[in-house]
Image (cartoon, rainbow, N blue to C red):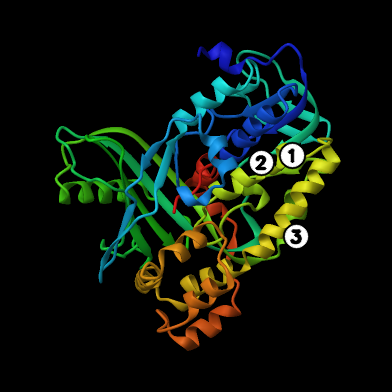
């Protein structure tokens, strides 16, 4: 695709639905809507040069309904029917649930194939949204442009806010192509046997390495940690990936690409106030900006698929009704996920940073079905009791105190903008895999 094709805006500057933000949420809404109502004129507006940015999404097969699997069926995916592994200081465990992964390049190509020509507008930044349309900034190929729309959906990345509280999940991943087969059969979604110190020297964290065998000679390695601040130290994390690769005999691999992200881990806050802060009258808000994320894991695949399918079933796509529809779904999601925010408070406020590994080590020793439902934010009453019942991984008095804490605001200070906010602005249209 040439630059002129990327930046071009269709001559017809009106549409039925304008989706601003071409991440997972926006792309899946466009796809579901196109399949349900092929007569609708859809525009997906993305400031970047590709849909989905430079990321990889992964999920358990059990996370999705049959309709959800069908929605993703035409995208190229890597599948591991044999399950996955976790590794902790006290044990290693193989779990049998099938695991899936999709690269953003395949999401981009699949969406361009599925949507009518002219539906995707790349490389154009939306500088104004309202109930009637979207204003695009000028580019080297054309002046400022107005796209009129019957409904507008804001699927841009998460907006840091003083109304939301919590910590951060920071990661850097590298896809490597090796000269020799790596011999890894199944994904290792948590290798927490690594050093638990935060890479930038501010004490401890919960750190783990995530490994995907993408082919006999291709492996994806990601260094991830839960920390109290959103500092993304690329050099330190890259060095840790080098160290992990050497330990596994993969030091001669050729890098194929890198990805990075800084994701919020929600421990509490005033969600109504946050909605008031980000709300644009008559504009629907979906994706991470709308609060559609797992508070503890930052996982979004399940809710992104569910929102896309629910959106496609709506009989009235006018702006006001659609905005109210997503507003109501967001409030229900916030209420539904309160339990996971409680667990996030235990993680950040009851466990010492270097001891947070014990929380996940205990959790992954529980029943497999419970673990699956947890990541999909579908824990039943027994699951919730079982996670808290038994020998606790944190001190009881610390856990009680943590219940009544909300944590620091998820808002980067000006002094952090060179590192944290840049990552949030550019790389938050991703999700954390389980």
Residue for badge 2 = 309
- Image point (22%, 34%), residue name: 217
Mark 2 closeness class: few <14, some 14–19, many ≥20 residues within 10 Å: many
Which quadrant of the view contains residue 208?
bottom left
Q: Nearer the viewer, residue 170 or 304?
A: 304
Measured from the top left, where is residue 238 in percent x and y?
30, 46
- Image point (74%, 22%), residue name: 41
SS type, badge 3: helix
Q: Nearer the viewer, mark 3 or mark 2?
A: 2
First of labels 3, 1 by sequence position: 3
> Hey, which residue is sitting farthest front in the picture?
66
Task: Answer yes or no: is residue 232 visible.
Answer: no
* Structural distance between the alpha carbons of marks 3 and 1: 29 Å
Q: Which mark is residue 313?
A: 1
Q: Which mark is residue 125?
A: none
Mark 1 closeness class: few <14, some 14–19, many ≥20 residues within 10 Å: few
> Pointer 1 and pointer 2: residues touching (CB < 8 Å)?
yes
Which quadrant of the view contains residue 31?
top right
Vertical order, 90 against 139 (above or below)? below
Measured from the top left, where is residue 408 in percent x and y?
57, 67
> Pointer 3 and pointer 1: residues touching (CB < 8 Å)?
no
* Structural distance between the alpha carbons of marks 3 and 2: 27 Å
Which quadrant of the view contains residue 195?
bottom left
Residue for badge 3 = 273
Vertical order, 125 against 332 (above or below)? above
First of labels 3, 2 by sequence position: 3
> Hey, which residue is sitting farthest bottom in the picture?
397
SS type, badge 1: loop
SS type, badge 2: helix
- Image point (48%, 84%), residue name: 398
């Amino acid at each position: 695709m040439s630059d002129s094709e990327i930046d071009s805006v269709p001559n017809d500057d009106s549409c039925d639905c304008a989706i601003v933000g071409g991440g997972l949420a926006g792309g899946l809404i466009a796809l579901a809507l196109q399949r349900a109502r092929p007569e609708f004129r859809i525009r997906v507006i993305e400031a970047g040069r590709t849909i989905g940015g430079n990321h990889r999404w992964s999920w358990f097969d059990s996370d999705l309904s049959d309709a959800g699997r069908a929605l993703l069926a035409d995208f190229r995916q890597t599948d591991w029917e044999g399950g996955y592994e976790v590794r902790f200081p006290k044990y290693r465990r193989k779990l049998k649930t099938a695991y899936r992964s999709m690269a953003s390049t395949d999401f981009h190509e699949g969406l361009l194939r599925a949507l009518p020509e002219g539906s995707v507008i790349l490389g154009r930044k939306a500088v104004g949204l309202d109930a009637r349309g979207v204003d695009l900034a000028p580019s080297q190929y054309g002046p400022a442009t107005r796209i009129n729309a019957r409904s507008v959906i804001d699927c841009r990345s998460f907006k840091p806010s003083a109304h939301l509280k919590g910590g951060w999940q920071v990661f850097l991943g590298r896809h490597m192509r090796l000269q020799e087969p790596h011999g890894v059969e199944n994904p290792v979604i948590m290798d927490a046997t690594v050093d638990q110190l935060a890479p930038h020297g501010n004490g401890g964290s919960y750190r783990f390495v995530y490994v995907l065998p993408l082919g006999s000679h291709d492996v994806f390695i990601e260094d991830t940690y839960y920390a109290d601040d959103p500092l993304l130290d690329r050099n330190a994390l890259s060095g840790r990936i080098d160290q992990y690769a050497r330990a596994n005999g993969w030091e001669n691999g050729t890098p194929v690409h890198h990805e990075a992200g800084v994701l919020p881990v929600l421990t509490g806050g005033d969600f109504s106030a946050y909605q008031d802060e980000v709300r644009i009258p008559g504009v629907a808000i979906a994706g991470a900006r709308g609060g559609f994320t797992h508070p503890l894991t930052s996982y979004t695949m399940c809710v992104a698929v569910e929102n896309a399918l629910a959106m496609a079933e709506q009989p009235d796509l006018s702006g006001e009704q659609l905005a109210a529809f997503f507003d109501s779904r967001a409030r229900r999601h916030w209420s539904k996920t309160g339990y996971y925010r409680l667990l996030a408070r235990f993680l950040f406020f009851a466990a010492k940073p270097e001891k947070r590994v014990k929380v996940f080590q205990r959790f992954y020793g529980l029943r497999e079905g419970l673990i699956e439902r947890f990541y999909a934010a579908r824990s039943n009453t027994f699951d919730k009791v079982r996670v808290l019942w038994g020998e606790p991984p944190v001190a009881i008095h610390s856990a009680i105190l943590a219940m009544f804490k909300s944590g620091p605001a998820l808002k980067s200070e000006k002094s952090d903008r060179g590192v944290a906010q840049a990552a949030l602005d550019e790389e938050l249209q991703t999700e954390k895999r389980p």
